[in-house]
Amino acid sequence: MEITDIVIRKLSLDSKMKAIVSITFDQSFVVHDVKVVEGNNGLFIAMPSRRTPEGEFKDIVHPINSEFREIISSQVLAKYKEAIEQLSMQVADIAPAEEA
């Protein structure tokens, strides 16, 4: 299974939830609402989940093995870092114009 597209739908720099992402697999199947979260040990991805009647959260979709989780995680985090770099370049381009 190949990841054919990653779309960052929302960026949030001022909370622990840094981004909401959609991932397309084999140009045929998409998973929405994958979150990029800042934890105590750095960034990680959280799969879409729902709250059970007992109040705990259960993943709706998730990789079955750690190897595939790492593939998804590394590609999503790389796309997130790329988006942050683009955002900082845009801010840098705007800042000098505002000073003039």
Image (tube, rainbow, N blue to C red):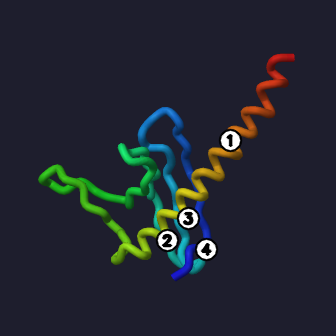
Q: Amino acid at mark 4?
A: Thr
Q: CA distance from mark 4 to mark 2?
A: 12 Å
* Mark pair 3, 2: CA separation: 6 Å
Q: Quadrant of residue 69?
A: bottom left
Question: Crowdedness of circle 2 by 10 Å Cα count: few (<14), some, many (20+)?
Answer: few
Residue at image position (51%, 48%) is 19
Q: Residues within 10 Å of mark 3 (few under 14, many from 20)?
A: some
Extreme-top residue of the structure: 100
Write the residue at 42% across / 40% down. Answer: 16
* Precedes in sequence: disc 1 or disc 2: 2
Q: Residues within 10 Å of mark 1 (few under 14, many from 20)?
A: few
The residue labelled by disc 3 is: 75
Q: Nearer the viewer, residue 10 or 77?
A: 77
Gap between marks 3 and 4, in whole Å? 11 Å
Name the amino acid type tagged 3. Gln
Tell me the mark number nearer the camera, choosing from 1 and 2: 2
In the rendered image, residue 58, in percent from the top left (x then y), is placed at 25, 60
Q: Secondary structure at mark 4?
A: strand
Q: Give left or right: position of 50 versus 39.
A: left
- Does the CB distance between marks 3 and 2 fall below 8 Å? yes
Q: Earlier in the sequence, mark 3 or mark 4?
A: 4
The C terminus appears in which quarter of the rendering?
Answer: top right
Q: Amino acid at mark 1?
A: Leu
Q: Position of residue 73 (x, y in %)?
A: 47, 63
Q: Judging from the image, what secondary structure is the residue with disc 3 in?
A: helix
CA–CA distance in space, label 1 to label 3: 18 Å
Pinpoint residue 85: horizontal percent, then vertical percent.
67, 45
Quickly name the residue at label 4. 4
Can you tell which mark lies on residue 87? 1
Pointer 1 or 3: first along the chain? 3
Badge number at residue 71: 2
Q: Quadrant of residue 65?
A: bottom left
